Image (cartoon, rainbow, N blue to C red):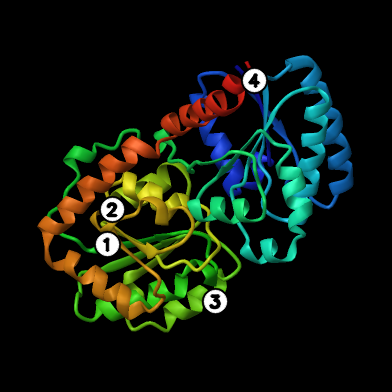
Amino acid sequence: MRILVNHPDFALLGGVSNHYDGLRKYWSQDVRYNTTGGRKNFNQLKYFWLFWDVIKFVFKMMVHRPDVVLLNPSLGSTALRRDFLFLTIARLFGVPVAVFIHGFSLEYLEKVDPIWLSKWLNKASLIFVLASFFKHKLEKIGIRTPIVLATTKVNDTLLEGVDMEKREMSAVNHLLFVARIHKTKGIYETVDTFDLLAERYPFLELTIAGNGPDFSELKTRVNQSAFSSRIHILGDLRGDALQKVYARADLYILPTTHAEGMPTSVLEAMAFGLPVFTRKVGGLVDFFNEKMGYITDSVDPKDFALAIEPYLNDIDLYRSVSEYNRQYAQAHFMASRVALDIEGKIEKHILTNKR
């Protein structure tokens, strides 16, 4: 099976580019990549890149002769119009198309013409989404194309060299936040939650890893905390540095209100055996249960503090949830498994029906 994947520039370090960059070494089939959209440092040349991407796409269709094209638009007008152009070209070549919608904007879905959107998406042979909620919304506007659930992934390399069996679990004293530094990710609620706990638990520390538009404001907020000396802001981390942060942490918090698809950091934290404290967003709702930590509709730091406190006092509870999360993530979220799952669903829903 030959698959041609359209993806954003890997240098942009976005969620979709990170997803496919991490899957590259785990495909079992002949999967080729094709960069589309803006490029880092040259994003203003969007019309040039569109022209160039179309030429390059046609060339790869002729040379590589894929059995399936996999498109990866976000749910926004610009991305959809661009990828509907690639969908049309692929269909002119007689090649079926799968569409993977990674993000999901209810605001956009309420504004867009549902007839226009369903007309185009119904020309695809398969649609991947990250949450059953997204699936139901698309079906409600008239999408008849089969829609299947998928997930983001944890890079297998992130766990290389980490012996999870020997991980020390004698005390719980390290809270971790890894995400883009933006108010919608719950960064201020995270600091407020820590402040509520820090007075009663003098051993507790908070590490914040990430960058974003609220980075300077975050520093100001942390400096105002009575416990600022126990809050560590590390900036954006990758590779070995990110691995070390997860390996040192005990608990993971993400009180996000962002329109999440499937927060990769939650899956990474679970893979390291961290109990997770988060909100009911995106695909988390489809699998997260009380054995994994805490999930809520609330954004109140008091609720998060109350949920975290038992783990600071009960090491057996912590160990039980930690082991459950580690095993669950290993079974469902590793890149080596996710790549095979995507291939299997394409084979089942597109190529088997085509034969």
Disc 4 versus disc 3: nearer the observer: 4
Query: Badge 3: few (under 14), some or many (20 or more) residues near its Cα, within 10 Å?
Result: some
| Number of numbered discs on residues | 4
Of pointers 1 and 4, the one earlier in the residue sequence: 1
Mark-to-mark CA distance, 4 and 3: 54 Å
Of pointers 1 and 3, the one earlier in the residue sequence: 1
Instruction: Indicate the secondary structure of the residue bearing disc 2.
Output: loop
Viewer-side residue, 47 vs 135: 135
Residue 85 picture quarter: top right
Disc 1 versus disc 4: nearer the observer: 4
Disc 4 versus disc 2: nearer the observer: 4
Residue at numbered disc 4: 354
Q: Position of residue 146 (x, y in %)?
A: 59, 38
Residue at numbered disc 3: 217
Q: Quadrant of the C terminus?
A: top right
Mark-to-mark CA distance, 4 and 2: 43 Å
Mark-to-mark CA distance, 2 and 1: 10 Å
Q: Quadrant of the N terminus?
A: top right
Q: Position of residue 205 (x, y in %)?
A: 29, 67
Of pointers 4 and 2, the one earlier in the residue sequence: 2
**Point 30% across, 48% down: residue:** 247
Residue at numbered disc 2: 274
**Point 50% across, 26% down: residue:** 344
Residue type, label 3? Glu
Residue at numbered disc 1: 174
Q: Are marks 4 and 3 in contact (CB under 8 Å)?
A: no
